[in-house]
Image: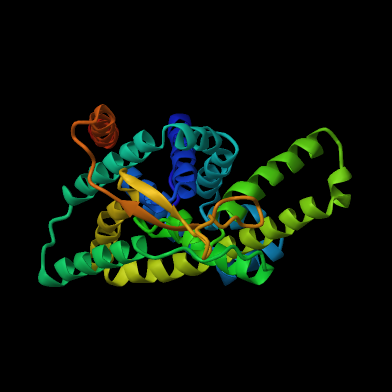
Amino acid sequence: MATTRTFSDKVFLFIKGLAMGTANKIPGVSGGMVAFVAGFYEELIYSLQKINKKAFGLLFNGRFKSFYQYINGGFLLLVFAGSTFSYFSISRVLNYFLTNHELYVWSTFFGMIIGSIYYILKDFNDWRIRNIIAIGIGIAIGLAISMMSPAKENDNLWFVFLCGIIGVSGMTLPGLSGSFILILLGNYVLLLVDSVNELYKVIIDIFKWNFDFIHDEERMRYMKIILSFTLGSMVGLVITSHILAFLLKRWHQIVTSVIIGFISGSLGIVWPWKKVIYKTNEHGEVLIDSQGDKVIENFARYIPDLQDSTTWIAIGFILVGILILLSLELYGRRKYFKR
């Protein structure tokens, strides 16, 4: 599925990777959904599928160019470069807005998911009973996941490795938020906040040629954690991409139907009007984890007050989110008609 790309195509692909990486870090939003809506989902799955026995044979025999071409390396490099860069740039800015303007951020994401559902459904014309049932199953699973309660934090390296395998699902399964899954597993803060921040500090130290962090036990603990998580994510990407490529090849419409259901079900996770419920002990005191963060038990969703001005501002941001997705469709149409 390798294609010749112009410079502008490469820039846009990097930006799409940037958006996918940012989405992967936001609970309730799926990087796979970005890939699906942006039109490079199937190329992503089939490119990852190429990381197989033949690819490793080319690599170990020193045929690096053949290996690069076989796995569609130019595409994967741009997408994952954008995704990686987002963790140290856009996602950090997004963390600020989530802290200070949480309602409006969630409203924008809610609108973007509504827009993405329209974007996918407009080209979906196979409404056979089996596909409708598949959509229903996807919605049910998405809603069921949104109602689960988070577990406690666990920094065991084997469990972190498992978190990597499971958490990367958000990149390969549109509508299934890897970040939200990590919240349910209890390790969202550990893996996508604390560890990323420590890695950022280590990278800065390396650029300053300062390697004192090697003797810092706490820093090295985080490096082991992020290494285990990264290895798990890589294994998960390869495994899930092979499974999904197999399923897409044989039951494309059914898989697409389940994905539509997942994305629709994720609206329950991203519902803007919700309050965080923290775990408490028998005395009613909020429990604090080892990192000094309040332990999340669940999210209480509520119907907004239409007499509150912030509600209408939030609705405005929902419309903005929808317009963002509609503009993507318009961009796609213009690009198509210019060919």
Is 95 on the left or on the right of 200, as rendered?
left
Quarter of the image with the N terminus is: bottom left
Q: Residue at x 23, y 41 (%)?
A: 304
Q: Quick one: which residue is furthest to the left in this view?
A: 128
Query: Which percent across, then down, holds residue 309?
Result: 25, 27
Residue at 61% in and 70% down: 159
What residue lies at 23% left-to-right and 30% top-to-bottom?
312
Q: Is residue 17 above or below residue 311?
A: below
Q: Is residue 227 left or right of residue 85?
A: right
In this view, the residue farthest toward the front is: 283
Seen in the picture, residue 22 relative to 33 is either above or below; the reply is above
At a point 86% along the width and 38% down the height, the residue shown is 210
Quadrant of the image containing the C terminus:
top left
Q: Quadrant location of residue 322?
A: top left
- Can see residue 50? no
Regarding residue 109, the answer to whether it shows in the image is yes
Q: Is 132 in front, or is 317? A: 317
Q: Position of residue 186 (x, y in %)?
A: 54, 62
Taking 12 as reference, is 228 left or right? right
Name the image colouring: rainbow
Q: What is the total number of numbered labels drawn onto the structure image? A: 0
Choose between 23 and 17: the one closer to the eye. Answer: 23
Q: Position of residue 170 (x, y in %)?
A: 43, 57
The one of 216 and 62 positioned closer to us in this rendering? 216
x and y percentages locating residue 75 in the rendered image? 49, 46
